[in-house]
Amino acid sequence: MNGARTAIATSEVHYPTRGGEPMAETGIHVLVMTAMIQVLRHLFRHRPDVYVIGNIFLFYKEGHSEARRSPDVMVVKGVDPGPERTSFKTWEERAVPSFILEITSRETADEDQGPKRALYQELGVREYFLFDPLGEYLPQPLVGYRLIGEEYEPLPPAADGGLLSAELGVRVVPEGASLGLISFRTGERVPTPPEAYRLLEEVRRRFTDMEQRAVRAEQRAEELTRELARLRAPVASGEGGAGPAKP
């Protein structure tokens, strides 16, 4: 009887498919996330047991709708990639992601490096990568962890900042505000589908525009500083004062 009541209570739990707040921060974050989902789907297109998705709720505790996260990109092995899910429930799929990528920023730093990392480690996500496309806070643009035993160990970056991903079978390499994938087997770039290529080109264009605006703002600030110093110079030297007193 207790088991029946538990089953009924669990079946009545509502698992939402949408959150009440935006799930991405900037246009660049959205574009990188969308492009990487498409690139990874293309990479695993011949695998009948790999599902690639992102920005949907990952529920990890049956009967607890609040026990959820929304990874930017996740790769799940051992499941059917065919049906699109509105959410992913680990107990129904009998699987957890093997790879998660978060497109991180200064605003999400505490969450991405604290509770999320601890949760993904506990769930058994074998690789967890963080990509900081705007270079806001990470020591290098791409940081990754590999589950060794029951704890995450940091992956050592190569000279180009790239990381080896055993779960993806590629090197993941930061390229400005985007990421590239290099095949283990051939050492060549993994082909990018046209849709993802257009998105990545848009990322590069927006990032270039941001850099140019930042340079112009810095130049303008320097000009204003020089102008302010020029205007203050006569006052500091005593020039332009009241002049000698009249007899």
Image (spheres, helix red, strand yellow):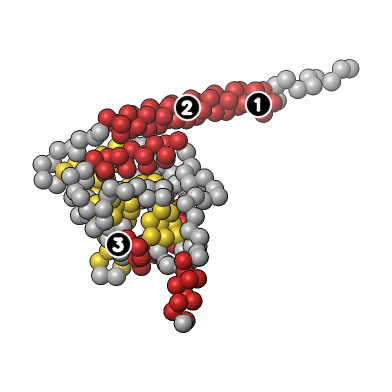
- Return the residue found at the far top: 247
| 174 displayed left or right of 19 | left
Under mark 2, the amino acid is Arg
Give the residue at mark 1: 232
Give the residue at mark 3: 95
Kindly identify the residue that appears in the image at 50 percent across and 29 percent down.
218
Mark 3 or 1: in front is 3
Where on the picture, by quarter, is residue 223? top right
Q: Which quadrant is home to the C terminus?
A: top right
- Return the residue found at the far right: 247
Q: Nearer the viewer, residue 236 or 124?
A: 124
Under mark 3, the amino acid is Ala
Coordinates of residue 24 in the picture (x, y in percent): 47, 44
Q: Residues within 10 Å of mark 2 (few under 14, many from 20)?
A: few
Task: Measure the C-alpha gap from mark 3 to mark 2.
Answer: 45 Å
Coordinates of residue 60 in the picture (x, y in percent): 40, 64
Whether residues under marks 1 and 2 lie with C-beta atoms below 8 angstroms apart, the answer is no
Vertical arrangement, residue 179 with respect to residue 114, above or below = above
Going from the N terminus, do you reach mark 1 or mark 2 first? 2
Give the residue at mark 2: 213
Kindly identify the residue that appears in the image at 27 percent across and 40 percent down.
39
Whether residue 25 appears in this view of the structure is yes
Kindly identify the residue that appears in the image at 41 percent across and 50 percent down.
86
Under mark 1, the amino acid is Arg
Mark 3 or 2: in front is 3
Whether residue 139 appears in this view of the structure is no
Q: Residues within 10 Å of mark 1 (few under 14, many from 20)?
A: few
